[in-house]
Each structure stands twice: as C-alpha cells, then as structure tokens.
Amino acid sequence: MADAKAAGTETTRRGALAWLLGAWGLFGGACAVGAGAMGRFLFPNVSFDPPQTFKAGYTSDFEVGKVDERFKAKYGVWIVRNDEEIYVLSTTCTHLGCQPNYLEAEAKIKCPCHGSGFKPTGINFEGPAPRPLERFRIVLAEDGQILVDKTKKFQYELGQWDQPEAFLKV
Amino acid sequence: MGFLRDLVNAIFTGPTLGPVLIFTISVGGVLALLRWYRVLTRPKVAGAALVAAVVAFALSLGDHNFRLIVAKPDNVPIVMLFFLVGFFTWLALRQAALNDERIEQGKPPREAEESEKSLTWPDLVYIEFLSTVFVTAALLLWSILLKAPLEPPSNPTETPNPSKAPWYFLGLQEMLVYYDPWMAGVVLPSMIIVGLIAVPFIDPNSKGSGYYTLKERKFSIGMFLFGFVSLWCTMIILGTFLRGPNWNFFGPFQRWDPHLLFPLVNVDLSEYVWVHWLGVGKPNSILLREMPGFLAVIAYVVLVPPLFAKRLIPVDIAAKIRGSGLPKALGEVLAAPFAAKAFFAEMYQRLGFVRYNVLMLLVLSMMSLPIKMVLRWTINLKYIVSIPEYFFNI
C-alpha cells in the first residue's frame, strides 16, 4: 500500500469516477454512432420500389368488362373497366394481406391463403375477408393518360367508393 | 374400387358435407373412446383398427392423386402424426382401462406396485445412447430419401395456390378461415396458452397423479382429447390433405383443379336477421345493425354458465330417459344433454363460483371454434358480429 502511494498509482475516489465517466462516455458514444448508422440504414440511397404514382395508358387501352392484370406484378393493382367507369383495385387481400389471383373463367378474385373471394368490383362475398378490396385514386393526367395514385385509398365500408377520384367516368 | 373412390370424392368435395363428416367422425370417435374405452382399447380391437387403417392407406396409395399429396415431403410428418397420435392415445387409454379395472376391484393402480425406479448406469445411459444412435440414423435416412422442398427465391407478386403454412401452423391457418385475424390469431391462441397454465389452479382433483386413469378424470381427459385430437389434429389433417387450390375442400383422390368452382356466398348474421328473416334491410346504425350478433355472443358467454350451474328441474331426467324403455342407443343419445347439465351443476358445487366461471369461459371459448366452423359449413354464416368499419368481427 505504501509502495503504491509512493509510486503515485493508488486509485483515488476522484480517479475512479473519472475512469467510470470516460468508459461510459465511450460506450454511450459507440452506441450513439451505432444507432445513427442504423437510422441511416432506414433511408437507402436508392429505392427499387416502384413509384406510388404511375401512368397507366389511355382509357381506350382498357376493354369494357375486363380485369386488367398488366399492372399487378409491378404496382400491385388491377385496373377494371365496366360499362360506365374505370377503377383501380388493390391486389392485397383484406384478410391477412396475401395476394389473390384473378380467375377469369369464374370472374372472381380468389385468395389462395384462406379462400377469401371477391367479385371484380372488389366486393367480398366468400371466405373470411372482412371487407372489400381497397380502391386507389384514379384521375386523368394532362396528357390524357390515366394517372393512378396509390397514396390515396378508398374503402367501400366507409362509403368512399362514391367519392369523385375513386373512379373515372368513361 | 373405382366406384368407391368416386363415392369418397363425391362426399368430400365441396364446402359442406366433407368437413362436417370428418368433424363428426373425429368428435364421435373421441366420444366413443371415452364411453367404451375398455372395449375399444383391447389389443385385438385396437390392432384391428390399426390394420384397417394401414390397409386403407396402402390401397389408397395406388391412386395417383392421393399419392401426390400424401408422399409430398412436406406432408410426410402429417401421415406420421395420424398414426402416432392414434398410438399414444391408445397407449394412455389402454393403461387407464387396466388401472380402472384394478381400482374397481379394490387394488391399487399398477404404477403403485411396479417400482418406477431404475439405475442411471447402465439402464438409462444405455437407452439414451441407443436412442441417440437410432434418431440420428433415422434423420439421416429421412434427409437423404425425402428432399427438402427448396424453392426459387420468393416473389411477392406470385402467391402459390394453395398457400400453406408449415404443417404445425395449419390448425391456426384453418382457424383463420372462420374467425377474424384478431380473434383466431390473438384471442383464441392466448386463451389456449393461458387456459393450459390455469389448469392446475382450476382443477382441485388430486386423483390420477402418478398413474393412468380415465374413470376418475373423465372430464379433464375428455376436454383435452376434444381440444387436441378433435380440433387441433383434425384441423391439421383437413388443412394438409383436403385443402386444395383457392383453399377449397377437395376429395382425397381428386385432382387439385384450380378452376373447380364452388358457389359460396357467405352471409353475416346481421344480413340473415334483418334482410332474410325480417325483410326490412339493414339499419344504418351500426349498433342496431349488429344487435342480434351482440345478443347472441352475450347470451353465449353470460347466460350459458349459470344456466348449466343451476339445477332447474329437481328430477333426474337423464335417468328417466334411460329407464323409459327406449332402445338403448337412442336413450343414451337423448339423455346425454341432460346428463351433461347435471354434471355441470355438480361441478359448480364442487369448484365454487370463481373457478367454475373461469373454467366455463375457457370451455366456451374452445367450443366457439367448432360452433363457428359448423355454422360456416352448413349455413355459410360469415361473422356473427361484423363491423368492418372498425375492424371488429366475431
């Protein structure tokens, strides 16, 4: 003990606190840097997600009474044209989010996960899906093409399908 | 043979008859086992059942479509499950039958006479060593003979049809067909776990500890067999072998045709009541619209437990029916609900208010699953309470 004092290596109370503070400071700093890096990770430089808004061609590209599957793979929507209007249906099942298939021969949309069935209008009529498929905003762009905007959705059970941009009169 | 195959296919294809029949067989089987377990677990009877099952299975393997599903590497464990669950149920009930006979003769159970002690070395270590060797060999063989189903990288735009969960989740997936996700995925599974944890606190019966018996623990074992075999295992088997493309029911020897069409229109209870029965159209107010459903659910949860707990009629109706000179089987069936009622009244006396009601809540939530399943299969009932506006469906 006496030798240690003489050599000046004895740990004092103040010294221990300084060490403690330094160590925790370093640890906290490292954690902060790690958290920052993690946060940065959530905002990638390049996003390969397809844009939420896209042009889908002219109204004449869509046949009356057909469910158009061209935009299913990339944008996750069906574009349907009936006698009066064109509307955009989400391809996400409202039960648990699987992607249903459109069965053309039976004219229905059927989910392979739990058997939910929807009419081409999006109305649920069989299986467990609790509500109809969602529709997306559809308007005409300035160049006359159809503009689909997936950031705004219209839900039938909330009475939103009658709203102006939920469908396109043709 | 071809005729039989077509008959089976005709019965099991479609949304109504097949599932109802399978469920009836599995519930009826468990009930029969509980009632006549001493006869049914005799080695000759059980052996005959095993032989019949194996022969039926082997003959079915001759069918191309059956083989396609049964021999799929994913599904091989379910075939094993079918036989293993049967075997272990038999094993336990057989020992229970032997013990119950001894107890009736005034003798202690076999476990009390046979010493259960054995030496760690060499007995236990030898067994463990041999088991390790055999299990390793079996797993090696299995992995060589049945290829792991490696598939191409996942593609979010292409959902396989049918999309099946791993086999141990198929019961859950089947539950999700009948109930809303929050109910089938959250409430009911939590109830199963909490309920299993609560069993020792609900059940004060100390009998059956350390030995097999059915007579002294009929209710507990019956409830377990119903929940595990009649519901869980049956749903796994339904989901594995009979659910085909578009999640339709297919016969066991039928080609899985993705274009096979079943006209199915599911109807909520509110629509049945307001539109079909009263003919007035659904009211605009959500609360009024769903009132029939709320009343049904409240009646089920709140009224059933006290109804079963009280002795409404002082006469023992079950005994009267049994003694009324009806054919024996008919008398048994007619007397069963009254006997159950008397049984629950007696249980209320035994367990007291709190434990009885906790038990009933667990039993009722378990029974809500088969009730909803049968309603969906028979009258296409979709939801009893259906409020899609607020994501609340029962």
Image: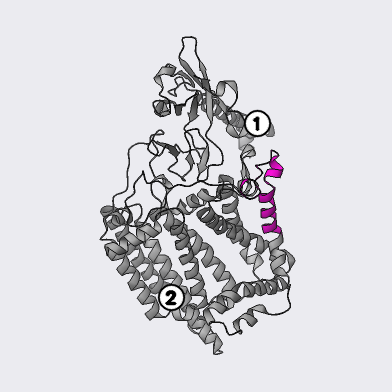
| Chain of the residue that carries numbered disc 1 in the rendered image | A
Residue A157 at what x, y percent from top left?
60, 35
Q: Which residues are magenta?
A: B275-302
* Quadrant position of residue A67: top left
Residue linked to disc 2: B119
On screen, residue B58 above or below A104: below
C-alpha distance separating marks 2 and 1? 60 Å
The image's mark for residue B289 is none
Query: What crowding class fits label 2: few (fewer than 14 Cα within 10 Å), some (14-19), or many (20 or more)?
Result: few
Is residue B205 something that shows in the picture? no
Task: Give the camera-side residue of B309 and B2.
Answer: B2
Position of B87 relative to B327 (above/below): above
Which residue is at 73% across, 70% downward?
B310
Indicate the position of residue B188 as horizontal and vertical percent values.
Answer: 58, 53
**B299 inside magenta stretch:** yes
At label 1, the amino acid type is Gly
Which residue bears the numbered disc 1?
A15
Specify whether disc 2 shares its chain with disc 1: no
Q: Quadrant of the N terminus of chain B?
A: bottom left
Q: Residues within 10 Å of mark 1 (few under 14, many from 20)?
A: few
Report whether A59 appears left or right of B322.
Answer: left
Residue B129 falls within the magenta-colored stretch: no
- In the depicted view, which residue is nearer to us: B140 or B160? B160
> Pointers 2 and 1 in contact (CB under 8 A)?
no
Chain under callout 2: B
- Residue A150 vertical position relative to residue B9 in the rendered view, above or below: above
User: Which amino acid type is shown beneath numbered disc 2?
Assistant: Leu
Label 2 secondary element: loop
